[in-house]
Amino acid sequence: PEGTVLVTGGTGTLGALTARHLITHHNARHLLLVSRQGPDTPGAAELTTELTKLGAHIHITACDTANHDQLTTLLANIPTEHPLTAIIHTAGTLDDALLTNLTPDHLNTVLRPKVDALTHLHNLTHHLNLAAFVVYSSATGTLGTPGQANYAAANTYTDALIHQRHAAGLPATSLAWGLWETTSTLTA
């Protein structure tokens, strides 16, 4: 309970749902919610107020976790009295196109928040004594979805890195979400 839980994509729909769940079901009390816009994200102030009323200390900050230097600085600034104890990587984005129409921009848009950010998170924290390292993946990585080859590749990488962490004895959980609704996810 005294440790810090880092939630990437923390001001997005999945990140906010996850933060609420961590507080109400797992008694998390120190959450670091990061996103590229951080506190400038529409609704971030209201989210902070809501989560604080639930009994948690919330810090929302801007960080492009796909940027190694920004992520290194973010992790170095986590207070020692509340060390990093868990990571939940919810960040991701879509940029759909048929395989024959995929451009480098389509690939970069989708791979950066999944592949680059996750690789940096793993490399910068694998030596820490984390209780959890959870990534939000997608069934698309296994089943495929028309127009989402880039997203399928990003999630396949996500799942493979989690297998690698697990094989190394590190905390590792990949949640390969299927089709879901934001109103019902994480409420059970």
Image (spheres, grey):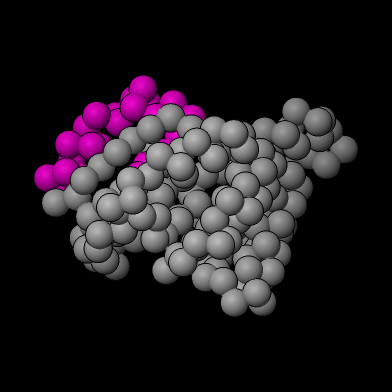
The answer to which image quadrant residue 52 occupies is: top left
Q: Please give the count of numbered marks on the rendered protein.
A: 0
Residue at image coords 17%, 36%: 49
Q: Is residue 154 left or right of residue 14?
A: right
Image position, residue 137 (x, y; %): 58, 57
- Viewer-nearest residue: 43 or 96: 43
Residue at image coords 63%, 53%: 123
Residue at image coords 33%, 35%: 60
The answer to which image quadrant residue 101 occupies is: top right
Magenta stretch in the rendered image: 32-54
- Viewer-nearest residue: 35 or 187: 35
**Which residue appears farthest toward the front when viewing the image?**
80
Image position, residue 171 (x, y; %): 52, 70
Q: Is residue 105 left or right of residue 71?
A: right
Q: Is residue 125 left or right of residue 34?
A: right
As for residue 41 lying within the magenta part, the answer is yes
Q: Quadrant of the N terminus?
A: bottom left
Judge whether 17 appears above or below 42 on screen: below
**Which residue appears farthest toward the right when viewing the image?**
100
Image position, residue 25 (x, y; %): 24, 65
Image position, residue 53 (x, y; %): 12, 45
Q: Is residue 64 left or right of residue 57?
A: right
The answer to which image quadrant residue 93 occupies is: top right
| Residue 153 seen in the figure | yes
| Residue 176 seen in the figure | no
Q: Quadrant of the C terminus?
A: bottom left
